[in-house]
Image (cartoon, helix red, strand yellow):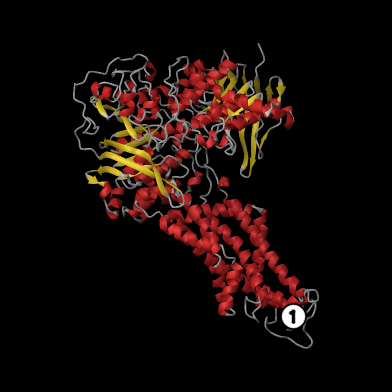
Amino acid sequence: MTEPLLELDDLRTYFYTDTGVARAVDGVSFHVNAGETVGVVGESGCGKSVTALSILRLVRPPGRIERGSAIRFEGKDLMALDERAMQQVRGNRIAMVFQEPMTALNPVFTIGDQIAEVARIHAGMSRRDAWAKAVEMLTLVGMPAAEQRAGEYPHQLSGGMRQRVVIAMALVMNPALVIADEPTTALDVTIQAQILELLADLTRRLGTSVLLITHDLGVVAENCQRVIVMYAGEVVEEATTATLFADAHHPYTEGLLGAMPRVGSDAERLATIPGTVPPPTAWPPGCRFHDRCPYAWDRCAREHPPLYQLGGGHVSRCHLAEEPEHRAHPHPPLAAELGVA
Amino acid sequence: MTTPTTLAPPRTRQTVAPLLAVRDLVKHFPIRHGVFGRVTGQVRAVDGVSFDVAPAETLALVGESGCGKSTTGRAVLRLIEPTSGSVEFAGQDVLALGARDLRALRRQMQIVFQDPFSSLNPRMTIGAIVREGLTIHHLAEGAAADARVKQLLEEVGLRPEYASRYPHEFSGGQRQRVGIARALSVEPKFIVCDEPVSALDVSVQAQVVNLLQDLQRDRGLAYLFIAHDLSVVEHIADRVAVMYLGHIVELAGVDALYTHPIMPYTQALLSAVPAPEPGVKRERILLSGDVPSPANPPSGCVFHPRCQHPARDAACAAIVPPLEEKAPGHWAACIKQPPSSVTWDEQRAAGGTRPPEFFLPRAALHRAAQAPTTLPPTA
Amino acid sequence: MSARATRATSFGALLLARTWRDPRSRVASVVLALVALAALLAPLLTPYDPAAQLDIVRLRSLAPSLAHPFGTDPYSRDVLTRVLFGARVSLSIAFAAVALSISFGILVGVVAGYVGGMVDVVLMRLVDAALAIPRLLLIIAVVALWGSLSVASLTVLIAGVGWFTVSRLVRAETLVVRDRDYVVAARALGTSPWRHVLPNVVGPGIVNATLAVGNVILLEAGLSYLGIGVRPPTASWGSIIQDGAERVSDLWWLTVFPGLAIVVTVFACNALGDALRDALDPRQLPLSASEDLVHRP
């Protein structure tokens, strides 16, 4: 089996704040193969964005990637690189697309300049060549009249257009991996469709791997081959997309799937997950989801579950893997008894 | 075939008098330039909107950013002064009321906001926030008010002892609940929900949506539910109005809209919603370009530059399509989707080259089985 | 596990707590407290009267000694006594003037920001015009017309030329807060939005106030040094320096001790103001207990 393009091994990123140590990412391991699109799903507070920033070592104090975390990319451990070597990786071999296109673009430079800058810095191109490359990239991402619009400023463009520019910047150096952190959340749904379509098309053509971070399971279903579900700083389930939607194992995943309103469904009430995500400064003992879980039993409060292998690349951090009989006895979760909120 | 009528506004099938009746609501924002603030143009945020809301029903107002749905919601409550048009609530002309009467009316019409961060005054305890309405309208004082506040907090799923805490101590979902409790404190009959769950995580969204439904059932509330998320809307709405660039382009019962959307924009909107069904490769209607600026909307049908209808032609750029009844209770603004009161001759006179034909692409449908080629038969 | 078992903390209490955590503010507060205490207890700390000429023959212009730790001035008055009583004058002028000017500035700023329109235009043009004239010149002009001023008049005058900046700051803040959803909610409920707007816009005004105290102390010292501040024989830090102005190198104690007092006090005010400004920084404001927000619209 070929080595994966990116492999995270026990990544831990902690934030040392006045109010305590926030263990935002607490032992996350997964891999991304060449040419595949992997989705990372989770709600706020689960640590997915911090994971993305950690891969590129963009975490600033009071945050710190703990010793013992390994981030292997193209065979090298990124944790072992010094800052200069790391800069060679960012934007060049691994690129990032952020959620808010307006803040990702510098308002005082033209979009052409910003794309060209990437080419100048990483490929050492001359100004003229870099500009030509910028126009080429803008055409690639579907911007009409690219030659002319390359001279425009970010505020002259709509949200969808700006996101195209950001994607163009990400793909200039033909990176092996693109990390997209909620790339369409801030966009209207018709524009979202355009952008996701674009991203899928380009990455397929160029053979780029994508780590797509999102809260929207629908986006994941349509764009990803594999899915990783995160909760409370950990991976709680990982599977191929088809398996996850057909045969989710972890109760949190089940909860998410049930809580999602779907066009065309006849559900009367949306299934909810009572309670809220615990704060990262105080993860509860045992299974971090146990107080919101409808199947939890005494083992769950005591014993922190490891990632159980379910076969075929499907893993789940839930004791139900060993004692599936408890699934037959659902009960109102602890959080519901304490009052919904 | 019933003659499509454009005079009578879209109504519910019930014969009960509507709680809220909006006619030709317009809100233009002036664009000023220069030192003296010369008006050089208008942002036509809401450009002639009409609809009814019956008691205890939910009318959803959907559309993308810039379509004017939020402005409509606030204009209906007179939190923004409309440029023209009429708003009637329970028989009263809202726009003609003086300050004192308006205040009294405010009890009956309330609003819940989108952003849980900025919708609560950070300097007040949540108890004080919920209590304010009671005090202003003299509904309860002292100990009775305290009791009422606790009751309201419980009703929205918060523990009564939270009354002494400050907003920053709560999560987004909890703050939305406080906002709902505040709206309920004055016993309204109608609530404008301005994207109340858009800023929340999915599982929290579900909690708040369920809460809103429960409250509607228990208190007989009517909602004007403004949203951009079509999946949430399908869940909670009785009828849906789709807005684009300040106009209502389609209005129908929720089932009808989702099973056979008529207006090409609605079709594109539905096709864009990602469906959580892996392996099912859905076709998408991809709209070209961006939403035009409301300061400079296209002529004729505001959607025509991006429209995918096969019969789109010059007539679409010349004629403003009336919002007309294409099927019982199902209204749409498109001269190319039959039936239309704008005859083919009139269209040809305006430069039309392609006759109207019914168009409903598979891509707009979420239930794979259906792909009707005509509308259900009219009464 | 929902909202944790924290004590209910109001915005004000949180602000105080966060300011206190900053070491600058702790030191500054202690210093200011000591200075204020010294001013308050002045009669207890010294046996002399600040205007008393002790012995014009033998005790004038003496260097610091055990009997007179800060020395005496050319009129044989004990300098330590004058510095202590001077603190009363300088500090009371500073606090009173700032209190007056900040209140007025906040009022004007909120009205201009909230009401807008012509009211805003008129008020702000007034402020712009006034800001164009240096404060010192304005004061000198007034003194030239009216002659020397009592402490009370001086205070009012300083307040009168000091409210302009605050009004602009508060107006800017009001423009932002005015459109916040909770203000709209108040209108929707039928309440007056004022009680929602006012407490939320005074933040920058408070920071400005703390820094202004330091500024006014300096201003008053300058004015007294120029001879147009407090009337002799009233002691203020500036007037003590004025007394030793001609013989700075000889009678160094007349410059150094009041000078030190000014420096230390103004420094402390600035440090406190900085700490307060950092504490008010919205990025540092506590976020929700559990962040289940997808994105901030």
> At 48% from the left edge and 46% from the top edge, which residue is drawn?
B167
For residue B59, side relative to residue C247 (left or right): left
> At 41% from the left edge and 41% from the top edge, which residue is drawn?
B113
Front one among A297 and B244: B244
| Residue A47, percent from left and from top | 58, 31
Quarter of the figure with residue B193: top left
> At 70% from the left edge and 81% from the top edge, which residue is drawn?
C47
Front one among C41 and C60: C60
Q: Residues within 10 Å of mark 1 (few under 14, many from 20)?
A: many
> At 66% from the left edge and 60% from the top edge, which residue is drawn?
C28
Q: Is residue B296 visible in this depiction of the protein?
A: yes
| Residue C187, percent from left and from top | 37, 50
Quarter of the figure with residue A38: top right
For label 1, the residue is C73
Front one among B349 and B337: B349
Task: Give above or below for C122 relative to A143.
Answer: below
Residue sitting farthest toward the top? A1
Name the kind of residue labelled 1 in the image. Answer: Asp
Badge 1 sits on which subunit?
C
Task: Say which element carries label 1.
Answer: loop
| Residue C49, percent from left and from top | 68, 82
Q: Is residue A68 visible in this depiction of the protein?
A: no
Front one among B263 and A276: B263
| Residue B354, percent from left and from top | 31, 18
Quarter of the figure with residue A260: top left
Total count of labels: 1
